[in-house]
């Protein structure tokens, strides 16, 4: 219990740090970004938007930094992230709530799939080390070094242009309206296959490699030899004795590499023009839509925190040593 | 002793012991020759060296100016004139890649060095001082570890008025040091209470001497592998940033090439020569760095090392590597 409380306190502090970082970054950067933005939009920004910009960048001379900070927090608790420039006057929170479900489904399913498949493959490879299976390692190694977005480009050119079996972009058929109907869900799944496959393939190699090395290390422990000597079935020794312990670092690694994977998947969305949060971020960057960028960063960070917390609790559940230590 | 000579020399196991000793001394030499004897690491170092050389001489050996627009030679597939074809505006892709290598390597190296410095300082200090200072430092590094780095980098560089190579390198370093610090702290913690450190302390050695001459040499492998890991992270981040167009699109690097390929519809036009080579370059550099890291891993972790070293021997004897045959046990028994 003490362990869990410590972790929860840690995540609260991290969330606070992320929000504060998000508040200070635009204020610490040099120059007068607002003026350059006003020039860029050439009179298309309303006075309200300009005022909110000055507030966002902390250039509002009328209020102190502390007042801004308190106001910022108050806004967050009301779910108010400001107003987007590009989709003016739509609030940022509305744009995010439209794109977040797409990302959660795509990234959630493909990340977990990659983890499970990669870990299983790593168990197999670690168990059969020193055989033909080691020949697969350089391949996995190569795949782990490929950036997500490039694999996406290759996937599009192979399966959408050269052999046109999957759509190259978008999250659903153009004419459809997002709703809970068989036709729409089918179309969404069809459009999701290629991006999901890209994410699974790019993330799987890392899990294979780390799991394989852990298996090699754990397999030479005495208790595994004893289990083998007792004549237990090979499958029992492999999964019940070796893999069970080897998977622990992988799970704590899962929590830590989540941020990295999420970063990669955001770019994958950009490549596929998938209507998720990464693509929205991409559009926000290209139109310098700062409130939207910041809102998205905050949402991504908070989601990663929640996922991290889940992985942490799973770890505590699986490994009794962590519970004792606390 | 003489009583024992006869049975021992008659016993076939003694020859086995002798060869085992010979094997062991050979292994000892391998350790001394260091990481270069590891085949994985050697391959990695060779690939990396090629790219480092290209980064230095790329500007001079590039056959064309990467910016020169040639309207009559747009979107040509690879040919003797243009080895990797041309872009939609007739720019030579090979030249773009060659000139761009420098940017990639420079940012990777700078970010790697800065991040490693931060992580060593934070990790060693927090592992060494303990107490409340340790709590605060590890809290900070854990916070940085959990906050997703790439979105943070995108936000910072997106807000900067002009993000050149060095700025990007520093932003990447500031967001990417935490993992190394965590590993370094764990290792320092385990070293801090060892006898040789206690002895140094009892001898009255000053703190800086204990840290730099007693602790640091034992961290070399971890520092090296942390450095390489950060360089991989930095190169991937930089290329990604250039690809999504956050950083300056007029500085050539591999990501910029991919940015132009994507925005000029190279995929739909089937211009594979535009986007495939850049990705292969990234993957090759990434693979070479991971190979070096595996070499370091195997160098440090004897279990991984002996598995790799004995795989061939086992295969020749037609033994399936399984639990009881783990070569580590053979080593232990001989010692």
Image: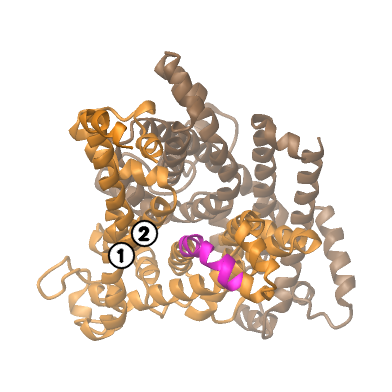
The answer to whether marks 1 and 2 mark residues whose Cβ atoms lie closer than 8 Å is yes
Can you identify the residue that label 1 sits on? B45
Magenta span main SS: helix
Does the image show residue A97? yes
Q: Could you tell me which residue is drawn at 52 percent across and 27 percent down?
A: A182
Can you identify the residue that label 2 sits on? B292
Pinpoint residue B278: horizontal percent, then vertical percent. Answer: 31, 65
Question: Which residue is at the front of the view, A200 or B193?
Answer: B193
Which region shows up in magenta? B211-226
Chain A: colour as depicted: brown
Q: Residue furthest front?
A: B2
Q: Could you tell me which residue is drawn at 42 percent across and 18 percent down?
A: A229
Q: Secondary structure at mark 2?
A: helix
Q: Secondary structure at mark 1?
A: helix
Question: Which residue is at the front of the view, A162 or B280?
Answer: B280
Question: Which residue is at the front of the view, A8 or A80?
Answer: A8
Find residue A28 and name its label. none
Residue B223 inside the magenta-drawn segment = yes
* Labels 1 and 2: the sequence-earlier one: 1
Same-subunit check for callouts 1 and 2: yes
Question: Which residue is at the front of the view, B36 or B50?
Answer: B36
Pinpoint residue B66: horizontal percent, then vertical percent. Answer: 28, 81
Instruction: Read off the chain for label 2.
Output: B
**Quadrant of the frame with the N terminus of chain A:** top right
The chain letter corresponding to orange is B
Quarter of the image holding residue A55? bottom right
Count neighbours of disc 1 (C-alpha within 10 A) and say few if under 14, some if 14 to 19, many if 20 or more: some
**Quadrant of the frame with the C terminus of chain A:** top right
Residue B335 inside the magenta-drawn segment = no
Q: Could you tell me which residue is drawn at 72 percent across and 63 percent down?
A: B137
Pinpoint residue A20: horizontal percent, then vertical percent. Answer: 77, 64
**In this rendering, position of residue A239 left or right of residue A290:** left
């Amino acid at each position: 219990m003490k362990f869990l409380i410590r972790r929860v306190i840690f995540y609260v502090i991290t969330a606070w740090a992320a929000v504060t970082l998000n508040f200070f970054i635009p204020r610490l950067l040099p120059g007068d970004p607002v003026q350059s933005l006003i020039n860029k939009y050439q009179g298309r920004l309303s006075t309200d938007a300009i005022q909110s910009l000055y507030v966002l960048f902390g250039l509002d001379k009328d209020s102190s930094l502390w007042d801004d900070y308190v106001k910022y927090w108050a806004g967050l608790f009301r779910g108010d992230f400001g107003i987007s420039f590009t989709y003016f006057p739509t609030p940022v929170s509305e744009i995010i709530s439209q794109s977040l479900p797409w990302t959660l489904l795509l990234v959630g399913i493909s990340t977990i799939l990659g983890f499970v498949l990669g870990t299983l493959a790593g168990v197999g490879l670690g168990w059969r080390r020193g055989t033909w299976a080691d020949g697969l390692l350089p391949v996995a190694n190569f795949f782990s070094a490929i950036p997500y977005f490039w694999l996406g480009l290759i996937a599009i050119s192979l399966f959408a242009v050269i052999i046109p079996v999957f759509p190259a972009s978008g999250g659903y058929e153009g004419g459809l309206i997002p709703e809970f109907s068989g036709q729409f869900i089918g179309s969404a799944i069809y459009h999701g296959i290629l991006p999901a496959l890209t994410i699974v393939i790019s993330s799987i190699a890392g899990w294979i490699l780390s799991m394989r090395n852990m298996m090699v290390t754990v397999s030479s422990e005495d208790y595994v030899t004893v289990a083998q000597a007792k004549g237990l079935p090979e499958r029992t020794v492999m999964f019940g004795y070796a893999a069970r312990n080897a998977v622990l670092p992988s799970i704590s690694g899962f929590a830590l590499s989540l941020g990295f994977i999420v970063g990669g998947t955001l770019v994958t969305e950009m490549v596929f023009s998938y209507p998720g949060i990464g693509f929205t971020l991409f559009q926000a960057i290209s139109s310098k839509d700062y409130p939207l960028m910041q809102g998205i960063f905050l949402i991504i960070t908070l989601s990663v925190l929640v996922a991290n917390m889940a992985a942490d609790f799973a770890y505590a559940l699986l490994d009794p040593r962590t519970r004792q230590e606390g | 002793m003489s009583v024992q000579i006869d049975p021992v020399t008659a016993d076939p196991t003694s020859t086995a012991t002798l060869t085992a000793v010979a094997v062991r001394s050979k292994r000892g030499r391998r350790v001394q020759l260091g990481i270069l004897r590891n085949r994985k690491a050697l391959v990695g170092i060779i690939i990396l060296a090629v790219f480092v050389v290209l980064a230095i001489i790329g500007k001079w050996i590039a056959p064309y100016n990467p910016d020169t627009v040639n309207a009559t030679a747009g979107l040509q597939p690879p040919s003797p004139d243009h080895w990797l074809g041309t872009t939609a505006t007739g720019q030579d892709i090979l030249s773009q890649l060659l000139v761009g290598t420098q940017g990639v390597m420079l940012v990777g190296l700078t970010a790697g060095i800065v991040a490693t410095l931060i992580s060593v300082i934070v990790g060693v200090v927090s592992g060494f001082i303990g107490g409340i200072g340790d709590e605060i430092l590890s809290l900070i590094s854990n916070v940085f570890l959990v906050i997703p780095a790439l979105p943070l980098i995108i936000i910072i560089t997106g807000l900067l008025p002009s993000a050149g190579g060095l700025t990007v390198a520093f932003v990447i370093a500031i967001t990417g040091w935490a993992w190394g610090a965590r590993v370094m702290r764990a290792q320092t913690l385990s070293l801090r209470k060892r006898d040789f450190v206690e002895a140094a302390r009892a001898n009255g050695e000053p703190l800086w001497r204990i840290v730099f001459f007693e602790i640091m040499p034992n961290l070399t492998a971890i520092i090296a592998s942390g450095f390489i890991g950060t360089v991989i992270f930095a190169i991937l981040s930089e290329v990604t940033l250039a690809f999504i167009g956050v950083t300056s699109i007029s500085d050539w690097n591999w990501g910029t090439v991919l940015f132009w390929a994507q925005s000029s519809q190279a995929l739909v036009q089937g211009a594979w020569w535009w986007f495939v080579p850049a990705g292969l370059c990234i993957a090759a550099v990434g693979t070479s760095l991971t190979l070096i890291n595996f070499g370091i891993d195997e160098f440090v972790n004897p279990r991984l090392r002996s598995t790799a070293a004995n795989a061939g021997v086992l295969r020749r004897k037609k033994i399936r590597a399984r639990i009881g045959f783990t070569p580590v046990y053979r080593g232990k028994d001989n010692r």
